[in-house]
């Protein structure tokens, strides 16, 4: 599952009437309220370029400098937990050596995000992973603040996995 930022604070980037099958990403997670599903999960969404066949993409409302809101954190944790239980997504945070699980778009983006540091996820990108998830060089998707919240999302997802009968990590 791949986390994105849409660089907007719109409540819905795809508009009314664009239900499953009519968008660039599988889900859109607004800053408040329920997430919106805009693509069937058994269909490719264009958000992850060459990673599309094996990815569930989740776009988020937000601008550079924003952090995910509490609502977004909860929504994303629930989507991830559901995907672990029902879609076979591995219950783990992606690494430079294994992109499965809870990932973020920058892992497949070419750019200079600072000197690579295995302990700083904001520096990880295509140079280390080899993934091609965008043709845009240097794209900050998602932002550093969003990436730093990935462990929080993962931790919150463990609660939902336990509650829904899945296997927490």
Image (tube, rainbow, N blue to C red):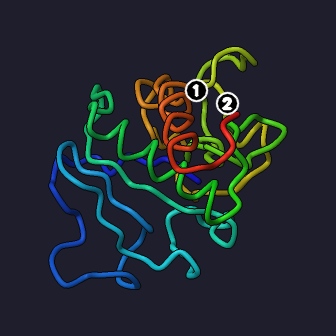
Of residues 84 and 23, the one drawn nearer to the viewer in this rendering: 84
Q: Residue at x 29, y 25 (%)?
A: 65
Which residue is more in the foreground, 167 or 90?
167
**Contact (Cβ within 8 Å) of mark 2 with mark 1:** yes
- SS type, badge 2: loop
Closer to the eye: label 2 or 1: 2
**Residue 31 placement: quadrant:** top left
* Residue at 18% over, 50% down: 33
Left or right position of 28 against 130: left
Q: Check the image and report above or below for 95 versus 61.
A: above
**Location of mark 2 (residue):** 124
What is the x, y in percent for residue 130? 79, 48
Q: Give 3 or 83, whichever is nearer the viewer.
A: 83
Quadrant of the frame with the N terminus: bottom right
Residue 3 coordinates in the image, percent (x, y) = 49, 47
Measuring from the top left, give residue 161's x and y in whole percent: 57, 44
Which quadrant holds the C terminus?
top right
**46, 151: nearer the viewer:** 151
The answer for how far apart the CA atoms under marks 2 and 1 are is: 7 Å
- Counting residues from the start of the chain, the first of labels 2 and 1 encountered is 1
Q: Can you tell which quarter of the image residue 38 is in?
A: bottom left
Q: Residue at x 49, y 22 (%)?
A: 148
Q: Position of residue 124 (x, y in %)?
A: 67, 30
Residue at image position (56%, 82%) is: 43
83 relative to 50 in the view: left or right = left
Question: Residue 73's mark?
Answer: none
Q: Which element type, helix, strand or loop, lies under badge 1?
A: loop
Reading the image, the residue beneath label 1 is 113
Q: In the picture, residue 93 is in which quadrant?
A: top right
64 versus 59 height, above or below: above
């Amino acid at each position: 599952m791949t986390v994105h930022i849409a660089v907007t604070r719109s409540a819905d980037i795809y508009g009314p009437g664009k239900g499953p099958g009519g968008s660039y990403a599988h889900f859109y997670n607004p800053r408040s309220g329920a997430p919106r599903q805009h693509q069937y999960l058994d269909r490719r969404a264009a958000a992850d370029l060459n990673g599309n066949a094996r990815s569930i993409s989740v776009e988020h409302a937000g601008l550079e400098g924003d952090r995910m809101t509490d609502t977004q954190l909860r929504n994303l944790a629930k989507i991830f937990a559901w995907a672990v239980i029902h879609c076979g997504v591995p219950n783990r945070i992606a690494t430079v050596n294994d992109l499965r699980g809870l990932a973020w778009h920058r892992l497949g983006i070419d750019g200079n995000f600072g000197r690579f540091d295995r302990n700083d996820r904001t520096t990880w990108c295509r140079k280390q992973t080899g993934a091609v998830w965008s043709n845009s060089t240097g794209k900050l998707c998602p932002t550093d603040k969003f990436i730093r919240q990935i462990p929080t999302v993962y931790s919150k997802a463990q609660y939902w996995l336990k509650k829904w009968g899945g296997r927490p990590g």
